[in-house]
Amino acid sequence: MAVAHEVQQPFKQAYREIYLLTDAERATRVYSNRFAAHIVRQHQFNALCAARAWKNQLRLMVDDSYPPAHRLLPAWGLRAEYWVEGAGDQYGRDTNETGTYLYLATDQVRFYPLDAAQHYAHAGGGYQQSWRDQGPAHDPVPLEQVPPLVLSEVLRDVDLFVGVASVGNDPTWLDNGREVRYHDYWRGYAFGDLSETAKTRREVLAQLIPRLKIAARCRLSERFLHVRGDIRSYKIHLGSGNIMMEPNDQYLCIVPARGTTTGAEGTRFVPFEGDGTMAIILSKALLLAEDTKITDPTITRQLH
């Protein structure tokens, strides 16, 4: 309806993601692993936390402890926590010049009563054994007792943190010879299963594609926007925006121009703002559908 009538929302309403309790979360009972085992850029993660009213501290490679990223929810008497730790152990390689970790590894999402004592963990991890309370201990709140709206909005925030800050979104990761130990994670995220945000993106693209000038060259599958060029055919991942070329799934590195955060040329309308990956996917699709017109040598040498 929003697409048909070209109603642009200042924030997602009609397409707002809903996160329902999963069977896995019912089994773990007091924590969610839905957004665990990701590698995210620490500074970007920290900025996103601030934008979404979460409290977080930058972690340094020092012998010190930090509270988890957390959001206070006084209207419901709850505190949401997202457990993270510094990734890596080599000063100067895994940190910047100030000793601040470049990347974080993510773990559980938990909920506690608002007045529960603050938890802490060592900056470099091991927190499943070393988390401690300052003051009276409180058990975590079972996820089934968290109001569904609160659970959904907290998980939506965490999905945003991972979806934006994950190294899996970096199209230059392999070409730049970045951390070999994160290559498996990068590949799994860059072309893996879709998050709820990416599933919503797919739903919107299904309505937008027929409005594109390149509609006849595009089709959607479960995880990809397929684009037929004249030189090659391409698969753009709907979560990361990364590209593989058919028929052998060769990786194609295209770095978006700085400031590519709004609707791409060739589209008349996008129903909401703020989805930079949507804009990147549309921009890449428009470019690749006319691949014979590409002149950038960093791209053309990959096509042949």
Image: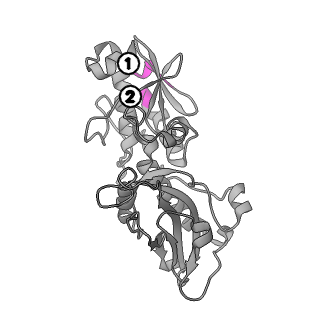
What type is the residue that disc 1 sits on?
A: Gln
What type is the residue that disc 2 sits on?
A: Cys
Q: Where is residue 178 in the image (x, y as percent from the top left)?
A: 41, 39
Check residue 103 for magenta coloring: no
Out of 76 and 101, give the one closest to the viewer: 101
Q: What element carries label 2?
A: loop
Q: In this view, does 189 lie to the left or right of 284?
A: right
Image quadrant where residue 51 sits: bottom left
Q: Residue 253 carries which label?
A: 2
Q: Position of residue 136 (x, y in %)?
A: 59, 88
21 above or below 258? below
For label 1, the residue is 302
Q: Is residue 85 left or right of residue 23?
A: left
Q: Where is residue 70 in the image (x, y as percent from the top left)?
A: 47, 70
**CA–CA distance in space, label 2 to label 1:** 8 Å
* Circle 2/circle 1 CB separation < 8 Å: yes
Q: Which mark is residue 81?
A: none
Residue plotted at (54% across, 48% down): 196
Range covered by the magenta-colored residues: 209-219
Residue plotted at (57% across, 78% down): 132
Q: What element carries label 1?
A: helix
